[in-house]
Structure formats: C-alpha cells, structure tokens
Amino acid sequence: MFPVDQGLSNDEVGKRRKQYGLNVLPEKPPPSAFFLIIQQLKNPLIYVLLLAAFVTFIIGHYPDTIIIFLAVFINTLLGFIQESRASQALYALKRYLTQKAIVIREGKRLSIEISQVVPGDIIVLNQGVKVPADGKLIFSNRLYLDEAILTGESLPVSKNKEERVFMGTTVVSGQGIMIAEYTGKTTKIGAIAGRIQEVEEDTPLQRQLKNFSKQLVVIVSVLTSVVFFLGILYQFSLREIFITSVALAVSSIPEGLLVSLTVVLAIGMQKILKHRGLVRRLSAAETLGGVTVICVDKTGTLTEGKMTVVDHFGDERKLAEQVLLANDLDDPIVIAAFEWGRTIIKNFVAEHQRLDSLPFSPKEKFFASLNKWSNRNNMLFVNGAPELLLRWANLKAEEKREVILTIENLSKQGKRIIGFARKEVPLTKKRLVVADVKKGLNWVGMMAFSDPVRIGVKEAFEKATAAGIKITVITGDYPRTSEFVLKELGITVGKKEIITGEELAKLTTEQLAAKVKSIKLFARTTPDQKLKIVEAMKKNGEVVAMMGDGINDAPALHQADIGIVVAEATDVAKESADLVLLDSNFSTIVRAIEEGRAIFENIRKIILYLLSDAFAEIIVVIGGITLGLPLPITAVQILWINLISDGFPNLSLTIDPKRADLMKEKPRSPTERLVNKWMITLIGLVSFVAGLLTLLSFIFVYKITGDLITARSMAFLTLGLNSLAYVFSVRALMVPFWKNHLFENSWLILAVIAGFILQVLPFSNSFLRQFFALNKLSLLYWFIAIVFSLVMFFVVEAFKLSYRLKIVKKWLR
C-alpha cells in the first residue's frame, strides 16, 4: 500500500477550512427574479400585444386595453413562476451530484466531498479521478494526467514525484499521492472559472419545438393576415379588425409552450430523483422514454455489489500474505480479500515494504506488486484473471486442467474468482515492467467471492421486458458466472446468445451489428469494447442506454443515447453520463425510463390541447367574416378565453400522473416525430368542430334574436366551455378517458372548476357584462353551450376509438 504519513488532524482541518473556505470554484447562481421577468417580456408576440394595447388606449377602447395588459401580466407571471421553479430545481440537482476525494487524516483513509478538501490535505490519486486541488506529488507510480482542460493538449502527461498537479485535471492511469497547496478560487482553474462556466445549450427536443413554433408563427401570421384583409374587404372597422387580428395571433400561438416543456422536464427529473436516479441533463429526462435497449453491468447493479470471500483454494497463509501486501484497496472485491487476510495474519504489512507496483488495467487484467521479502531476494506478487495467470505459471498440464475445472464449477455457482501467483526476483530488481509478470510465476491459488442478486431486480427485468425493452448484460466476468445470475433473474441464455470479449475483438462493427440483435450476454469484455457494442446497436436503429463506471467507459457512455453510471463511478465517467444511479440499482433505470415515457406523453398532451383551442378561435372568426356576418367574437373575449381555457388546464397537464399501463407498451420508434400525423389530424378535427359549433351557436342566436351582443355572448360561452370539457379526453391521448383514472390529477379538476367559474364570471354583474360587451343568457342557451361542450368531448373520444380500431390509422399511413 501507499507510503503516507498521518495527515492533518480534524482540529487542524477545521482551522484551515475557516481560513481558506470551501474548495469550490466560482459558479453562476440561479438567474435572478428580475432577469426571469425580462426573459418573459423578450418575446415578439408580447411586443405585438403591447402595441395593440397602446393602439386601443389611443382610440379609447379601454376594456380591450385592460384585458391586453392583463394578458401580458398573467403570461409574464405564469412564465416567471414556472421558469423560476425549473431553474431552482435544476440548480439544486446540479449541486446534488458531488464529487469525492480520498484523503489521509489522522492516519485514516477517508472519502470526502471535494468541497471539504483544505490546503495541507494528503490526497490519494487513482485512475479515473479528478485532481481536487492544486498541489505537489509526494508519490508517483506511472502516473499520467489529462491536462487538456488547462493546456488544450490531448495527450496524457507523465507526472513524477515533486511535480505539480492541478485541480480539474484527470488521472488517466497510474497512482499518486499529493499534498494540497491551493483550493477553490486560488487554484489555477479557479482563476479562469468565469471563462469556463458551462453554457447550457438547447436540448434536441427544445430545438425541435422551436422549429415547430417558427412554423406555427408563419401559419398563424398568414391566417391572421387573411382575417385582417377579409375584414377590410367586408368593410369592418379598421380598429375592430386590427384588434381582433392581434388578439387571434397572440391567442393562437402557445408562447408558453417552451416554458411548459421546461417545467415538465424539471418535474420529471425530480420524480426520477425520488427513485434515486439523478438526471444530469434536461434532454435525457425525455430521451429516457425512448430507450429500446439497456446495456447493463452485472456487478453492483444486478447484484448487491457487497463482495465477501466464500471459498479459497491453495495455501491459506500464502494467500493471506498476498492479499495484504499486493492490495491498493481501490475496489470492493480487493477490500473483501484484504479483510479476509487480516483475520488470518496480524501485523504483517510493515515487515515487507512495497518497492514498486503495476496498477490494475482492464486491458492487462492483473495487478502486480514488488515487495521486500528477505535478505536474499524480493517478491513479485501478481493478482488477476486466473486463466491469464495460469498461462504464465509453472504448472503441469494436468494441474492446470484441475484449476480450470474448479473455475468452471465456481462460475456455474455465480462466484467471482481472482487468481494469485508470485515469484522471487533478485534484490537488485527495483522497478517492474509488464514483461516481468508474463513468465515464470508460481501458482498460489484462488479466492471465490459471492455477490447476491439485488432484491427487486427480477421484477424490474420483467417490467422492462413487458415494455418491449431489450436487456443486454455486458460484464468482465466469466460467462458461467453471469449465466447463473441471469438464471436467478428468470432469464435463460442459450450458447448462441453469448459472446466473449475474445470473440468480439475479431468482429467488425458491421459484423457485430448483424450479430448483436440475438446476443443477451457479453462476457469477459474490456471497457473499450463497450464503445464497439454501442456503435453496433445504434447502427441497428436502437436507442441505447449504456452502463459504465470507469474512465475507459467514458467514450461508450458519451456515444450512447443515455449514459448511466453508479454513484461510485469515476468522475470522468460521471461527466459523460446522463443518469447517475444513486443506489446503483437496475430497478432505478427502469423507473427512470417509465418517468421518461410519462414526460413525453405530457408534452404531447400540452401541445395537442394548446393548438386545438388556438385554431378553433381562428376558424370562428374566418368563418364569420366569409359568411358575411358580424365578428362572432371580440378581441377582449378572445383574450379572456385564451387566459382561462388555456392557462389553468395547461398548467395542470404539466404534472399529470403517468398511466398505470405505460410500461406494457413497446418503445416509440426513434424516427417518430413529436407532433405526428394522428396529432395533426386530431388538432385539425378538434379545431374545426369546436369552431363550427361556436359559429352555429352564434348564427342560431343571431337569427332568432337579431341581437348581436346576445349572439356574441353565446359564442363566447360556447368557445370558452368546450375546451374545459375535451381536456379530459386529451389527457388520455389514445386510450379511453376512463382508463386513465379521471380523478387522479386533482389539479386538473380544480383547474377546470376554476376555468368554469371564471368563464361564468363576466356574466355575473352589470359592470362585467358591460366591460366584456355581454348580455344575460337564458337557461336554454346555457344548456346548448354545455351540450356542445360535451359533443366536443365525444368527438375526441370517437377519433381515439376509430384510431384504436385502425380505421383512421390506415388512412394516416
């Protein structure tokens, strides 16, 4: 183990923390309230609305002015509240993911948050970790650092004893011990922290929605221009048709759509966090819902990850010597071996100082340690994959066959195995090279470790399979060991469904892409082969979730659609990941995918609802003008409906609970658009029917009474009520509304009740009736408006039924 002193005392750590503060870089705080308010107003549509308010004020049409300003105020307030919550949630989630450092304090090896490192701390550096402070090396063993973040140089840099290392750089290979000299803002990277702040880019989903919104702006601009010119052609007053056109434009474009998207994703991230999964990027929260294959590691995810020694083969004394001397305590399995060794031998380590070591690497699959042994020689200890050590060991063929048979039997029982070998070397030998290991070893024996299957993983496997998600296990373990674990999970794996790392190395990406469809288990693989597997799967059109934990996994994690790491993963792996499993449990992945599917559904519900209501208003106005009728509805009435009919139910849909049968459906196609053909068809159908019913109600009352105010009152009521009814049908998308637990979203019930009350409110007294240019309506008219609203509800349900019966589906292809 490493040569270190006692390190700082706890009292001294406390004093230095007060003196130097926390070891954190300068960071941008969440956006201020003033900034968020300004962001809501930086919208071309808001500019148009304010212009309209100014025009109406100049010409003395004060009710429209008040309502327009109210519309701007409510839109700004709702947007501010939503974005404020979202930004605070994302900021909190970002800070939740803390990095760790290994320090020596009071003679003990401790894992602490990087923020708690103080100058003077002795810090252990292993492969894959980030250097947590600026300082000087007091020990180095083939240490290479990636300093690209500071120098831009892509090649790793060799670091020797007495050389300086810097915060934020990454250990590529080897080991080291450093003394921290500078922390936080006094580090080299701290001085330039303001220039390397992470810039949040739009997610793919946000870009798709922005493009969609631009197309929508063009469509609505054309339609409202048609309304304006038709109004002029039919000799409407310039003031009236201008205000109506502006109101239509504003009410027709769901300017709160991107804000709602942010809220849906942020809420989804928080729900996933409750299941012990930390989503690091907004886009990943939605992408999770489209995953078609999960590539999962066996150890620590399907199993408990709590290794214990259950059997050993060979000289007990020699095995104990080796696990105590040749051990860096940097992995659960070697820690378990060390604890076993301490029960056999006491006070042994200090007698045999380590002279050199070769750190474990996934490529070589062994760890070697050179130690002082006697006055005549030193000892080279080698721990690693037993089949490799057997190749280099001085054993007879028959003895090797016996060992291999033991390995096979242990693998069938689901045991993990480490082999141990050693050889004497001259006293003059002070430095190791790989070639020293690969010849002339004396076989010592093996140790078997048990790692039980996690509770709940079997049910999660069944749930994922029912959801049409393929599960592929990728492990460095033996095929038989992994087969045993999968068998305990209820999964039978045939010989043709297994491929080893040795076989994989011989395949091209194209060959693997053809073969990978039938593979359930990749065994004895190296981390760098994961990238090859991901590329092959993506070539087949899969949406891949890939698990990893080491620095060598980072390329595969980055290449995968969703990179997943456990909480104990290296910092480099975490930075490449989209989802961090805080409990290292496979069940968390399945729960996160389920929440991702729910996020996608809620986004669709919001789009469907907002656009259906928006285009109905345009159809009413265009229909009235082309039929030579007076305007069926005024600008102030349109804006009121927009605020009430859209606002409250729209907000409630952002938190709509997920369907119970969501994980009984296959994943959506990766090529499927967010707003697909059936959605466009349904939006068109709802808009047309809602607009037609509103127009019919206007014509009916206008012809009977000859009173324009009463007819507009009827149109205003009908248009305002119908969206409050069909929101329940839209909420269930393509399944019957009763299958989605009607009363599960209590906020939606409250939103509809509030919307109904506020829709009735303008009819309630003489002042409001005058303000909105309304008349009292008879019970007959109220009955007709309510019936028309129910008709809208059943129109949507009828469309969904015809789609399920494949009547519409064939036509939409």
Image: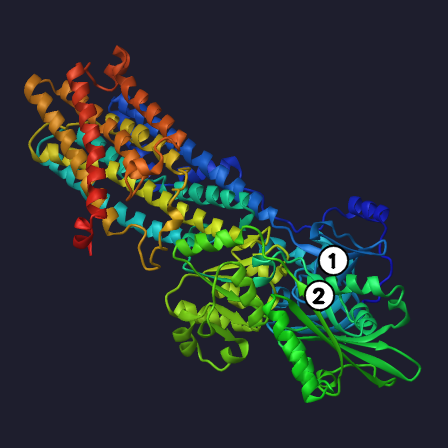
Task: Work out which residue is located at the far top of the displayed protein and give it.
Answer: 766
Colour scheme: rainbow
Residue drawn 42% across the image and 54% down it: 287
Which residue type carries mark 2?
Answer: Asn
Q: Residues within 10 Å of mark 1 (few under 14, many from 20)?
A: many
Residue where numbered disc 2 is placed = 126
Horizontally, is 18 left or right of 687 in the view?
right
Q: Secondary structure at mark 1?
A: strand
Disc 1 or 2, which lies upstream in sequence?
1
Horizontally, is 101 left or right of 64 in the view?
right
Q: Is residue 103 above or below residue 727?
A: below
Name the one closer to the observer, 645 or 801: 801
Name the one closer to the observer, 352 or 158: 352
Q: Residues within 10 Å of mark 2 (few under 14, many from 20)?
A: many
Q: Secondary structure at mark 2?
A: loop
Q: CA distance from mark 1 to mark 2?
A: 9 Å
Q: Is residue 119 above or below residue 51?
A: below
Question: For residue 736, what is the image quadrant?
Answer: top left
Residue drawn 76% across the image and 62% down it: 124
Q: Is residue 670 visible?
A: yes
Q: What is the x, y in percent for residue 73?
A: 39, 29
Q: What is the x, y in percent for residue 726?
A: 26, 34
Q: Is residue 547 visible?
A: no
Pointers 1 and 2 in contact (C-beta within 8 Å)? yes
Q: What is the x, y in percent for residue 2?
A: 81, 67
Residue drawn 37% across the image and 37% down it: 653
Numbered-mark total: 2
Residue where numbered disc 1 is placed = 102
Which residue type carries mark 1?
Answer: Ile
Q: Which quarter of the rendered picture does the C terminus lie within?
A: bottom left
